[in-house]
Image (tube, rainbow, N blue to C red):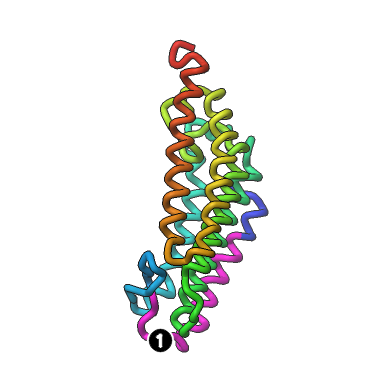
């Protein structure tokens, strides 16, 4: 799974560590670490922890997503969607680092409410996830993993084609939160939960239509 393209997310992670350490002397002692559903800061952490936590978390997620296919019994299938899987991992790393930079900006008094950053970022992430879904081949770690999709390759493929469209719609609906900032997180959560539930239920009915476990 590790190719020359991996230099791109690695550079982003190194940049995050380097940038955090570079501005460390300029940061206040307390840095925002959590926002409530209304987009207001409700928790703080020491700058030493904050500067290292997000880049370290990003590195851990990146390594997990990169090497976990090696222990998947269906690891050969990852080769069939390796390009799409790489770009998804890259986008996820970029999302976490952009959130890290937003947090550092908030420590300096950035007045942009997190709702106007996190909701569009998550919506775009979900739209790209929707584009990624139809390309995912059967495996045990990535995608809509239900007893029915794991059992049947046909159910897996049809479910992920459908789920891709559903996830894109959920991402687009989430963007409505930009116009209703007080409800933006609620809109996003409902849209995402509906997309997940619909995809799981759809996989069951596809499996039944294709003959179930008798096939």
Res. 36 image quadrant: bottom left
Magenta region, main secondary structure: helix
Extreme residue toward the bottom, this view: 26
Residue nearest the observer in this picture, 76 or 199: 199
| Percent of width and height locating residue 15 | 57, 71
The stretch of residues the image draws in magenta is 9-32
| Percent of width and height locating residue 77 | 58, 33
Residue nearest the observer in this picture, 114 or 18: 114
| Percent of width and height locating residue 119 | 50, 61
Q: Residue at x 54, y 67 (%)?
A: 98
In the rendered structure, the answer to whether residue 206 lies left or right of residue 193 reads right
Q: Which residue is mark 1?
A: 28
Q: Residue at x 37, y 69 (%)?
A: 34
Q: Residue at x 51, y 33 (%)?
A: 139
Q: Residue at x 63, y 42 (%)?
A: 82
Secondary structure state at the residue bearing disc 1: loop
Which quadrant of the figure contains the N terminus? top right
Extreme residue toward the front, this view: 180
| Percent of width and height locating residue 12 | 58, 66
- Asked if residue 58 lies in the magenta stretch, the reply is no
Q: Is residue 183 above or below residue 31?
A: above
Res. 159 image quadrant: top right
Q: How many marks?
A: 1
């Amino acid at each position: 799974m590790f190719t020359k393209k991996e230099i791109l997310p690695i550079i982003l992670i190194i940049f995050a560590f380097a940038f955090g350490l570079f501005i460390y002397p300029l940061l206040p002692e307390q840095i925002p670490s959590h926002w409530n559903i209304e987009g207001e800061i409700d928790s703080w952490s020491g700058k030493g922890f904050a500067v290292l936590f997000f880049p370290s978390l990003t590195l851990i997620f990146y390594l997990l997503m990169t090497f976990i296919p090696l222990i998947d019994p269906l690891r050969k299938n990852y080769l069939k969607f390796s390009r799409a899987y790489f770009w998804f991992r890259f986008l996820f790393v970029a999302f976490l680092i952009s959130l890290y930079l937003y947090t550092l900006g908030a420590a300096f008094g950035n007045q942009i409410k997190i709702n106007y950053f996190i909701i569009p970022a998550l919506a775009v992430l979900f739209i790209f996830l929707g584009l990624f879904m139809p390309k995912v081949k059967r495996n045990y770690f990535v995608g809509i993993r239900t007893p029915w999709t794991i059992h049947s390759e046909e159910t897996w493929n049809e479910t992920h084609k459908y789920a891709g469209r559903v996830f894109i719609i959920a991402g687009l609906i989430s963007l409505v939160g930009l116009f209703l900032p007080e409800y933006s997180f609620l809109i996003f959560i409902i849209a995402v939960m509906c997309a997940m539930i619909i995809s799981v239920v759809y996989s069951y009915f596809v499996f039944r239509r294709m003959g179930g476990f008798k096939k």
